[in-house]
Image: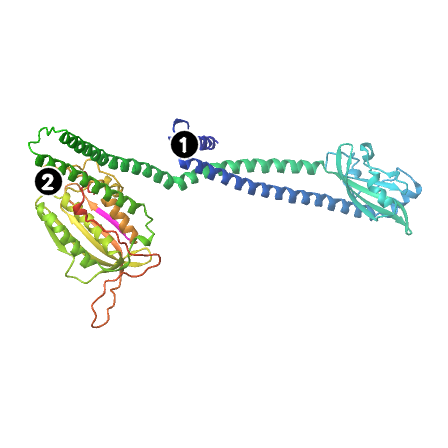
Amino acid sequence: MRWVIAAWRRMREGWPGAGARGKQTPYHATRKRLVFINLAVVSAILLLMASSIYVVESHALLGQVESQLRDRAKIELSHSDELIASLQTRSPTVTLPDTHEPDASGEQYEPTGPNIFTIVLDAHGSISVDASGASDYGLPDRSAAASVLSGAQRESLVQAHVQEQEYLLYTTSLTSDGKLVGALQVGQSLAPMEQQLHELLLILLLVGVGALALTAGASLYLADRALLPMRLAYERQRQFAAAASHELRTPLAFVRSQLELVSRRLQRAQAGASGSFATPGALTESVRADLDETLNEVDYMTRLVRDLLLMARDQGDHRSLAWRPVDLSALAHDAAETARPSAEQRGLTLDDHALGGEDVWVMGDYDRLRQLLLILLDNATRYTPAGGRVWVEIRSGRSSRLVGRRSLAQVIVGDSGVGIAPDQQERIFEAFYRPTGHSANADTSGADHGGAGLGLALARWLASAHQGDISVKSAPGEGSVFTVSLPLTAAPQAEQGDEPVDEPVDEPGGEPVDEPVDEPVDEPAPSTGMVS
């Protein structure tokens, strides 16, 4: 029972760490609502079942008593000649046959017991035979026998209340030569039946309370399990909002300070105090440099907001993608050639193995897939020391399967860089996450890699939006290998003599995206970890 009490306290206090010690969270009310709805539904079901069991058992017991009374009356009527003789001689000492145990043993009738009494009434309702002494308890009930003695009914079965006791009374007529001479009334107290029903009700109540306690505990457990994604999503949302606010606040503060600096310089120039600037041209150059830095920060915020808006879209919303057959080999080669100048500038070798094999085709948005590969290549070049190696290759994993039993096309981007710790390899795909202990720069100058930490999060979103996945294998100091898996598709068939037409393929709900896609190599780099 202790765990039930503990579960109830948890329900009152909310999630661990919440409750009285903390602020209620949005999923708090949802959790309680789920538990209470579940308890209400189970309570209604238990109440319906208990009521049905009680009613059925009550009718069954009452039917059993009625059957016993009719059987007893049949036994007594089998000796109707003796009963009629007793009425005609009006001898109250007539002994009934020993076919009924209580009377034969001389046992007196007890209304709280399950025994049956038998009373013979004459035509006027007077007691003719009462061997068990039932008349001491206010029996028989003449109102129950009135309809039989009057000849209106041949028999009657009624439930009567006599001296604070409930009885079921069966009365049948006694006739001689077609003439009504009296009545036979047999009955049984319903106290034993009521006691049985009371015990049944107590059992049903205890079972119901136990079932509700188990339901409460199970509901709390299942609610915790069911709402765990909601809680994690809420926590991620809070972290995401805090990180996004921080990333936007920093450049906004820089923009404000730069503009204030420009404003003060212009005010001094208008006042005729050039300060440290020897010529107006020097002042102009300084203001222009400040404005250029401001524009760079504005561009950074624009890209950040654009990526946030893209990641805020539903992965199943195909309207954000322009679907068409894409030659993945050619796409990977194009992305590698785009990233090659940046790699060579950093003293790296970029090996392009995308071409040379069979063409690998997928369905997707060419620009978005290119953006995905450029993110991976940009991270590889940024976190590989000078003299290191970066490579790109394509695989057609026809033996591998995705959901829906479709073969895979895989793009692999690897490097010989600083690597990623095992406990951080999953979290690098979270927005704004910067791994701890992974701050070693690829270059020797100690330059900061910068960035908002959205690159790999955006890469995973793009892979998922294309019904694929992205994974990483890495070890500190041994480099990293990122694998993008996408559903493989057949190459488009071009008519003979015609050049392949690179047109988007219409898809339900799909429409081309006309916004430009900036290459990650032109964006600010991440500060720590392989996150851009």
Residue at position x 59%, y 37% in the image: 203
Side (left or right) of 278 relative to 452? left
Between 467 and 416, the residue placed more toward the observer is: 467
Q: Residue furthest right?
A: 89
Q: Residue at x 50, y 35 (%)?
A: 213
Q: Which mark is residue 319?
A: none
Q: Residue 376 appears at what percent x and percent y?
A: 19, 48
State the count of labels.
2
* Residue 237 visible in this rendered orientation of the protein: yes
Residue sitting nearer the eye, 338 or 528: 338
Q: Which colouring convention does the figure follow?
A: rainbow
Q: Position of residue 101 (x, y in %)?
A: 77, 40
Spatial CA span between label 2 and label 1: 47 Å
Judging depth in this view, the residue of 196 and 280 nearest the camera is: 280
Q: Residue furthest top?
A: 21
Mark sitting on residue 24? 1
* Residue 453 sits in quarter: top left
Q: Earlier in the sequence, mark 2 or mark 1?
A: 1
Q: Main secondary structure of the magenta part?
A: strand
* Quadrant of res 326: bottom left
Residue type, label 1 = Gln
- Mark 2, secondary structure of its residue: loop
Q: Quadrant of the C terminus?
A: top left
- The residue shown at (27%, 38%) is 244
| Residue 517 is one of the magenta-drawn residues | no
Q: Which residues are magenta?
A: 468-472
Residue 478: which quarter of the image?
A: top left
Residue 97 visible in image: no
Q: At label 2, which amino acid type do we have?
A: Asp
- Which residue is identified by label 2? 443
> What is the secondary structure assignment of the residue under circle 1?
loop
Q: Is residue 164 above or below residue 514?
A: above
